Image (cartoon, rainbow, N blue to C red):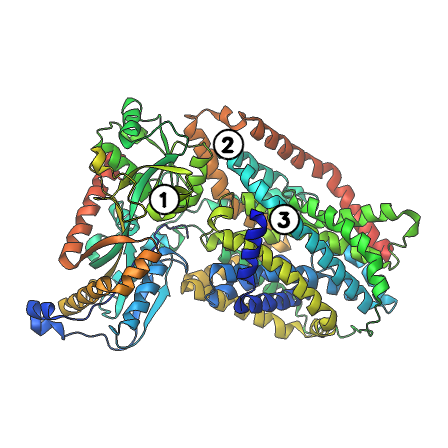
């Protein structure tokens, strides 16, 4: 009952005219950014964070807008998958399998509409799961002491490369780079400065927002300049939507099942949305047996990964809100945002910032409804935007990033710093070193270090305190599994995803 | 980004007959013309930000300034970036006020603003404070501050403290000052674990992982009211106003420690005495206004007011004490 009351209060927050308007704007911008090939949800949220600061929004409004962007980007990601066979991000890869064939058969509008419905169902299921599970997990999280938290952070890093990391060594290198950068600034356990070289701007450490916007948005601009891709894809054509109610009903069972599968894989730290969309596609294919035409443009083959990846995206919010452990790149960006607003996710967030947590959950529900309403009639518009030459879009994105960063601190140092991160991001992407682990390292490094030192301080330097409770031993065991399994399963899984995609053509 | 300073208030007052009596010639010698700048040395949403914005709004509402008050956020180095900026680039700017709090003096005392000291600005006024508390979980064996201090006297490492500031920060120093007043030896051996904010520290105390919490009253109120935290002592000179009046002070338990985390402002060093006096008077008026009392109440600030020379002397004295303590526990050489 408490949960229900809290949720209703959350709706009260989310339904104020301004917040509703922000949610709408967030959905729209998110879909737009998600639809642009190459700019995934993590980038989308990263680029729009400075905007939230520029507008001087109160924390709950800023979060509601960014949650809407997050949901919108997941929706938008599928547009380019279906129309161009270019996934906006990794989780959208599975949508190409049946979405693109449908588009080739002249049923692009139907494919988009079905994916919108499936995304909605998947998100809805995951929202319900989030509402039920998060408070329980938050209460459980009180039993976490310093040793358990340390083990949990190790788990987060161990599962990071996870199922989809392309090269585990490069993932580890990126995480190590992030951890190294996180040691810059004041060491809160001794009060002394580390690696600051007397530069005042570095005393509080590297600002995540600057790092994120630089690494993602600025590097994207540099890539664009390199490609000099002046033209949009103007060959995109849309048919008139002729979707019947019966066809929507036909994909509902698939969407429901896939939403559940997606949610569960999203809750597991480190697994994320890619696993969600892959699992739901394969599970559904198996469930349907010989009745499916998966890979040839089966509507259910669009619905399954879409419901799965949206379910997983929302599921990833559970560990993020309750434990402060992001389950995916995008939730890592959202976590950075929370920390910047002086809100520390964790068990107490549900008590201390209840209005924010429940406001965000309510916004997620409202956002998904808005997206459904927005997407079906406006699909044509989003398709048109896909044809806008990036030479107009990229400068706009960069402008938003620069104005936003400057408005946070009024410091030109931060701008140079952001550009430096952009160059770094460009170089790392050239070397195919993933960027998300860097952000995670930067974000979780101080926490991990702090908990290790606290545990050792409480035990007077006895290291065995780290595995002295059943809970911590369990977490260590899962971490070990998480580290080993991807080496065995990962390449196999990716090969299958790729193989399916090629066969599907 | 993780700085703890929360709210600070500041206001302008109008020049009264009393002030005129003090210095008729100076009373109207200065008056800001046009926009006034208030630097909040933190990101939007922090405590210093609140100080600037709420006082700025009142200055406008009470017609104490001719035009508007604009809050500029200048985060970095726990206030050090703004401090350096004021010292070097705005030395003579008489339309500028900068938010400060105990966090600022703590850092100055420990030389954490390299090459800068407390006499490089003019300390103007404090407009309220958040008082320190020492608390334990509801099922803790300790029921009073002397009991806790006796345990520390037997073995300084036997009680662990969690707080929201860095090691050597205000929450840490409060515990050490209290322990010293209770004649605990070997302060260096007292375990202090630093968290990002008070809420996180309280979580660990309530979860039973750490013995005691040191922080401010405003961040712990929710947990005191819910019964999760048992307050052993409020570090105030007298009991807090209702409904917190049933919390015992340290002083009434025989340990004479008072730890207000004040919220206030400083001005650049190069402004004239007239300007300084104008700001002191104006902020006195803000403090005296009913509107400010309401803001304080809504935001958990307790009465605490010092301005002008009195405030300056208070700041210098506080820094001296903190410096001595930091040296004693080896935080500064």
Picture quarter with the C terminus of chain A: bottom right
**Picture disc at residue B165:** 1
Horizontal and vertical percent position of residue B203 = 45, 39
In the displayed structure, would residue A167 be above or below residue A72? above
Residue occupying image coordinates x 11% and y 68%? B19
Q: Residues within 10 Å of mark 2 (few under 14, many from 20)?
A: many
Horizontal and vertical percent position of residue A459 = 43, 26
**Picture disc at residue A130:** 3
Q: Secondary structure at mark 1?
A: loop
Quadrant hosting residue B184? top left
Q: Earlier in the sequence, mark 2 or mark 3?
A: 3
* Alpha carbons under labels 1 and 3: distance apart: 32 Å
- The answer as to whether the residues below labels 1 and 3 share one chain is no
* Alpha carbons under labels 2 and 3: distance apart: 26 Å
Q: Residues within 10 Å of mark 3 (few under 14, many from 20)?
A: many
Quadrant hosting residue B95? bottom left
Do the numbered discs 2 and 1 sit on residues whose CB atoms are within 8 Å? Answer: no
Residue occupying image coordinates x 33% and y 68%? B57
In the displayed structure, would residue A181 be above or below residue B280? above
Q: Which residue is at the front of the view, A343 or A200?
A: A343
**A307 lies left or right of B192:** right
Please report, as a chain letter, where disc 2 is located.
A
Horizontal and vertical percent position of residue B235 = 26, 41
Find disc 2 in the rendering and name its residue.
A147
Residue A49 visible here = yes
- The answer as to whether the residues below labels 2 and 3 share one chain is yes
Residue occupying image coordinates x 51% and y 62%? A61
Foreground: disc 2 or disc 3:
3
In the displayed structure, would residue A337 be above or below residue A179? below
Residue occupying image coordinates x 22% and y 68%? B92
Q: Which residue is at the front of the view, A162 or A62?
A: A62
């Amino acid at each position: 009952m408490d949960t229900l009351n809290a949720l209703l209060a959350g709706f009260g927050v989310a339904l104020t005219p301004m917040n509703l308007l922000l949610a709408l704007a967030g959905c729209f911008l998110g879909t737009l950014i998600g639809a642009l090939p190459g700019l995934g949800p993590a980038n989308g949220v990263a680029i729009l964070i400075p905007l939230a600061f520029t507008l001087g929004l109160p924390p709950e409004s800023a979060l509601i807008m960014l949650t809407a962007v997050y949901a919108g980007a997941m929706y938008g990601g599928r547009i380019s998958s279906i129309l161009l066979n270019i996934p906006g991000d990794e989780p959208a890869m599975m949508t190409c399998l049946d979405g693109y064939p449908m588009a080739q058969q002249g049923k692009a509008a139907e494919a988009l509409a079905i994916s919108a419905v499936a995304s909605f169902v998947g998100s809805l299921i995951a929202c319900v799961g989030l509402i039920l599970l998060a408070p329980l997990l938050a209460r459980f999280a009180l039993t976490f002491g310093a040793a358990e938290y340390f083990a949990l952070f190790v788990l987060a890093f161990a599962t990071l490369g996870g199922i989809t990391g392309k090269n585990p060594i490069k993932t580890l290198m990126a995480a190590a780079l992030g951890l190294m950068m996180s040691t810059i600034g004041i060491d809160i356990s001794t009060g002394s400065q580390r690696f600051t070289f007397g530069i005042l701007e570095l005393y509080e450490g590297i600002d995540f927002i600057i790092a994120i916007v630089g690494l993602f948005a600025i590097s994207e601009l540099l890539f664009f300049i390199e490609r000099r891709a002046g033209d949009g894809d103007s060959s995109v054509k849309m048919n008139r939507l002729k979707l019947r109610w019966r066809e929507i009903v036909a994909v509902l069972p698939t969407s429901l099942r896939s939403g559940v599968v997606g949610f569960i894989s999203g809750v597991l730290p480190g697994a994320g949305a890619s696993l969600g969309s892959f699992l739901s596609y394969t599970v559904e294919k198996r469930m349907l047996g010989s009745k499916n035409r998966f890979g040839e443009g089966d509507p259910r083959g669009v619905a399954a990964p879409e419901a799965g990846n949206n379910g997983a995206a929302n599921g990833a919010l559970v560990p993020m809100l309750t434990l402060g452990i992001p389950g995916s790149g995008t939730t890592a960006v959202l976590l950075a945002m929370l920390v910047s607003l002086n809100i520390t996710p964790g068990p107490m967030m549900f008590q201390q910032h209840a209005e924010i947590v429940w406001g965000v959950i309510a916004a997620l529900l409202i956002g998904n409804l808005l997206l459904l309403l927005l997407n079906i009639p406006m699909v044509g518009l989003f398709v048109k935007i896909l044809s806008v030459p990036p030479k107009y879009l990229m400068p706009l994105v960069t402008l938003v990033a620069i104005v936003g960063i400057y408005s946070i601190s009024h410091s030109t140092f931060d701008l140079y710093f952001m550009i430096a991160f952009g160059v770094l991001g460009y170089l790392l992407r050239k070397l195919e070193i993933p960027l998300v682990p860097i952000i995670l390292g930067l974000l979780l490094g101080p926490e991990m270090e702090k908990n290790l030192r606290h545990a050792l301080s409480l035990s007077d330097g006895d290291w065995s305190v780290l595995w002295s409770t059943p809970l911590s031993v369990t977490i260590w065991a899962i971490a070990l599994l998480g580290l080993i399994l991807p080496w065995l399963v990962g390449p196999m899984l990716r090969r299958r995803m790729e193989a399916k995609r090629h066969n599907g053509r | 980004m993780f700085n703890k300073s929360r709210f600070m208030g500041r206001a302008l007052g109008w020049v009264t007959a009393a002030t005129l009596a003090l210095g008729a010639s100076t009373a109207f010698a200065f008056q800001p013309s046009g926009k006034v700048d208030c630097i909040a040395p933190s990101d939007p949403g922090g405590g210093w930000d609140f100080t600037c914005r709420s006082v700025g709004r009142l200055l406008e509402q009470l017609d104490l300034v001719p035009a508007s008050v604009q809050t500029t956020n200048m985060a970095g180095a726990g206030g050090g970036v703004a401090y350096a900026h004021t010292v070097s680039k705005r030395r003579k700017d008489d339309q500028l006020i900068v938010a400060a709090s105990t966090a600022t003096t703590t850092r100055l005392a420990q030389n954490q603003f390299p090459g800068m000291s407390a006499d490089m600005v003019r300390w103007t006024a404090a407009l309220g404070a958040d008082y320190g508390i020492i608390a334990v979980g509801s099922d803790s064996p300790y029921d009073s501050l002397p009991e806790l201090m006796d345990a520390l006297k037997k073995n300084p490492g036997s009680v662990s403290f969690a707080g929201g500031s860095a090691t050597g920060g205000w929450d840490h120093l409060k515990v050490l000052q209290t322990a010293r007043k209770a004649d605990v030896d070997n302060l260096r051996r007292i375990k202090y674990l630093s968290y990002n904010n008070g809420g996180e520290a309280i979580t660990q105390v309530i979860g039973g992982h750490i013995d005691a919490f040191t922080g401010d009253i405003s961040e712990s109120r929710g947990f005191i009211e819910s019964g999760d935290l048992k307050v052993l002592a409020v570090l105030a000179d007298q009991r807090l106003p209702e409904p917190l009046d049933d919390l015992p002070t340290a002083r009434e338990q025989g340990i004479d420690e008072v730890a207000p985390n004040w919220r206030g402002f400083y001005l650049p060093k190069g402004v004239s005495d007239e300007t300084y006096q104008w700001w002191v008077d104006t902020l006195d008026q803000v403090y005296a206004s009913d509107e400010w009392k309401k803001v304080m109440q809504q935001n958990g600030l307790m009465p605490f007011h010092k301005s002008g020379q009195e405030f300056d002397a208070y700041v210098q004295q506080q820094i001296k004490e903190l410096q001595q303590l930091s040296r004693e526990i080896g935080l500064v050489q």
